[in-house]
Image: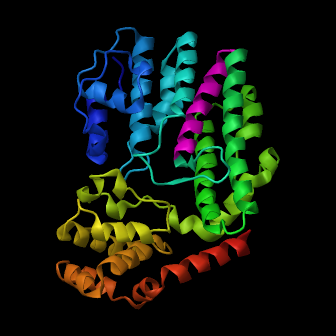
Amino acid sequence: MLDYISPATLVEWVENTAPFLFTDRSPVRPARLTELGFNDILLSVKQGYAWPESPAEYIEDYFALCLSAHHGTVATFIPTDVDSKIRGLLWRDNKDPESHRRMFSFAVAAMSWPLAGVSRRTTALAGLGPVSGHNGEQLSVLMGALQVFLKNCDAEYAALAHAAIDAELRRESIEFATALETKGAELDALRIVASITHNVGDVDQGLGYWPKLDLYDGPRKDFGRLAHENTAPYGGLFAHAAKIYKKVMSPEGHRHYPLRSIKALRQSPDLLLPLGPFFDDWGRLLGKHPLLNDASRAEVLGAMVTGCRKIQGQRGYARAIRGMYDELGQAKIATLLKTLPNSVRKDYEDPELRKAVAVSRESFESSMRKAFLAAR
């Protein structure tokens, strides 16, 4: 109906990176996509969903599909790229103010979709629910809603959208404050720093779809540049987190391109990456997970060795290699290396990499705790 990626293609992309979301083959109950949960939305489209003819209803359902695709893949190795649609284009292309309200209500409900099975990058200390990169994606969608309500002069729903954004940012700031105040929570604090710095970056990305009009000055002041010079909202906690992120965690903020081609890693949510650089347990899992064989283990090992050379400063892959080493032992690692190209074996023998892998988990995590305390 509109010039978007076809729904079938979008679902194919999701299935390519997260096939475990499609193991249930039972028929989905007949309903509008906006009435279903994220997994049923994906399954319904795969099973031949009959799209509505009304342009507004079509966009609502397509919006639901995009949110579902994003929710299911944003923490996988190949996230489905629908950012521009859920942050801006679908809000713009829908001309029906009542439909905008329904889209907003759906987006708020989608913030409660479960993360178990789609992410291992969550942290929870304050009892207010987990904080993760998913929250940044949700915030950027709410920013799209706020912009369109302001444009529509819909004061009621503009206030609702503003309140929803504020509540989420306040929740995340409390999570970070709790980590700062909790003795022994230094590693969780670093994980939270990585998540919330990413999240306010997503808010800025959402604001980037807004025209430069005085109408939008209020929300820009309230929510924009929180990781930078805008330290008045939320006690400046997001700028504080960003300072720590820059000093300690920024080398881990890459997109893991070395691992994207390895299909074996897509077989189970168990194999999703946690927040780097804390990959020791993930490396141990690679060494024993029943869905991986020696060929796939060697492929992952080779990709991480190459990644250590290509991505300067990052430490996560070395920790994963150490985890594999702890699980499999030196002889097994040597056997896996023999199946890899000479260039990879040479990279593995690099003194800096060998030195990083030789550091025990306890010593590494102790150094990260000290780095956090020094940066705070």
Q: Is residue 153 in the magenta section?
A: yes
Q: Position of residue 166 (x, y in %)?
A: 71, 36
Q: How many labels, in total?
A: 0
Task: Report the span colored magenta.
Answer: 134-154
Dominant SS in magenta: helix
Q: Position of residue 356 (x, y in %)?
A: 46, 84
Farthest residue toward the top? Answer: 54
Q: Is residue 93 in the magenta section?
A: no
- Viewer-nearest residue: 267 or 184: 184
- Viewer-nearest residue: 324 or 54: 324
Q: Is residue 232 left or right of residue 332?
A: right
Q: How is the image coloured?
A: rainbow
Look at 72% across and 67% down and name the residue there.
183
Vertical order, 9 against 50 (above or below): below
Q: Position of residue 359 (x, y in %)?
A: 48, 85
The quadrant in which the C terminus is found is bottom right
- Residue 13 visible in image: no
Q: Is residue 8 left or right of residue 125?
A: left
Q: Position of residue 318 (x, y in %)?
A: 42, 77
The quadrant in which the N terminus is found is top left
Look at 38% across and 36% down and name the residue there.
69
Q: Is residue 100 left or right of residue 55?
A: right
Q: Which of the 4 image quadrants contains residue 48?
A: top left
Q: Is residue 306 left or right of residue 352?
A: left
Vertical order, 238 against 84 (above or below): below
- Residue 116 visible in image: yes
Farthest residue toward the bottom? Answer: 351
Look at 36% across and 15% down and name the residue there.
31
Vertical order, 64 against 338 (above or below): above
